[in-house]
Amino acid sequence: MKLIRFGEAGREEPGVLLADGRKIDASGEFRDYDEGFFASGGVEALAQWVAEGCPGGKQVPDHERLGPPVARPSKIVCIGKNYLDHAKEMGGDPPAEPVIFMKASSAWSGPNDDVLLPPGSTKLDYEVELAVVIGQTASRIAEADALDHIAGYCTFCDFSERQHQLEMSGQWCKGKSADSFAPMGPALITRDELADPQSLRIWCEVNGEVRQNSWTHDMIFPVPFLISYVSGFMTLLPGDVIATGTPSGVAIGMDHPRYLEAGDLVECGIDGLGKLSQRVIACKP
């Protein structure tokens, strides 16, 4: 099943993307895809509604904006340097344990929304990632039980302003949390439709040029381990997002970094999950 949200930013309605390509409005049956929805068996109820033919659901026009497929989460947990080649291009040895940082949920953005270049920014970078959406509360869970706590998967881009992240002291979140820096979508693919999250091709193009091209099996720490590990430090709530790291090919890893500029088009994709498309737009001072 593929969950979508559509409509004006901040006022999205829930829907589903059917196998025949039709988008169906589910707002007559479900309020939103948020913590309460996932915690109360919403995915199962939605699946039953779809199996019954989506009674009362109207088709969503193709021109409607798609928002992020889940409501703004309580937290966006990110994993740094989780692909060996990316760890090498960032300098230093691969981490012995997952590197965890947070991204402000106010950076939440839709799959085709513009990414805003902060005033004075000169080092805007891209990071395509597999995102995992938590389906039930997870606190200190065993790795063997981790997959049972997943609602689904999405394509995610961890946009990063490297000067803010690395040259201005403090934690990484300063360079990771600007408005529009966390696009996700285009749909949430439920766990039952993806047998193995470690077998997916993951890629990023800038203005049609392939910059990142890898496979999720190249992760140093796989998805079940990450969920178990993170849940040992914080309680993961339904609807929370874990961004599982990016492969090599980011701008900062180049001998002569080619950071993003206004007008650039960034396209990120994961086979089977769909594509993001962001145009870089200069933010007004």
Image (tube, rainbow, N blue to C red):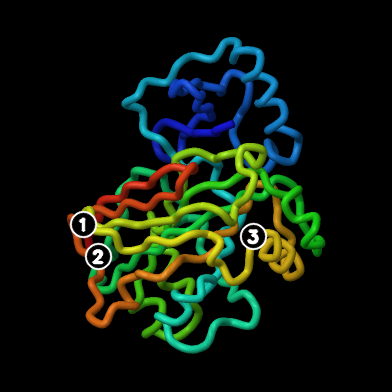
| Residue position marked by numbered label 1 in the rendering | 264
* Amino acid of disc 3: Val
Question: Residue at position x 28%, y 73% from top?
Answer: 123
- Secondary structure found at label 2: loop
- Secondary structure found at label 1: loop
Question: Residue at position x 37%, y 20% from top?
Answer: 61
How many residues crowd mark 1 within 10 Å: few (<14), some (14–19), many (20+)?
some
Note whether 26 is above or below 153 in the view shown. Answer: above
Across and down, in percent, residue 182 comes to 44, 56
Quadrant containing the C terminus is bottom left
| Residue position marked by numbered label 3 in the rendering | 223
How many residues crowd mark 2 within 10 Å: few (<14), some (14–19), many (20+)?
many
* Amino acid of disc 2: Leu
Note whether 28 is above or below 239 in the view shown. Answer: above
Say which label, 1 or 3, has the lower sequence index.
Answer: 3
User: Farthest left residue?
Assistant: 263
Q: Nearer the viewer, mark 1 or mark 3?
A: 3
Image-based side of 212 in relation to 56, left or right: left
* Amino acid of disc 1: Asp
Question: Residue at position x 29%, y 78% from top?
Answer: 254
Q: Are marks 2 and 1 in contact (CB under 8 Å)?
A: yes
Across and down, in percent, residue 80 comes to 52, 72
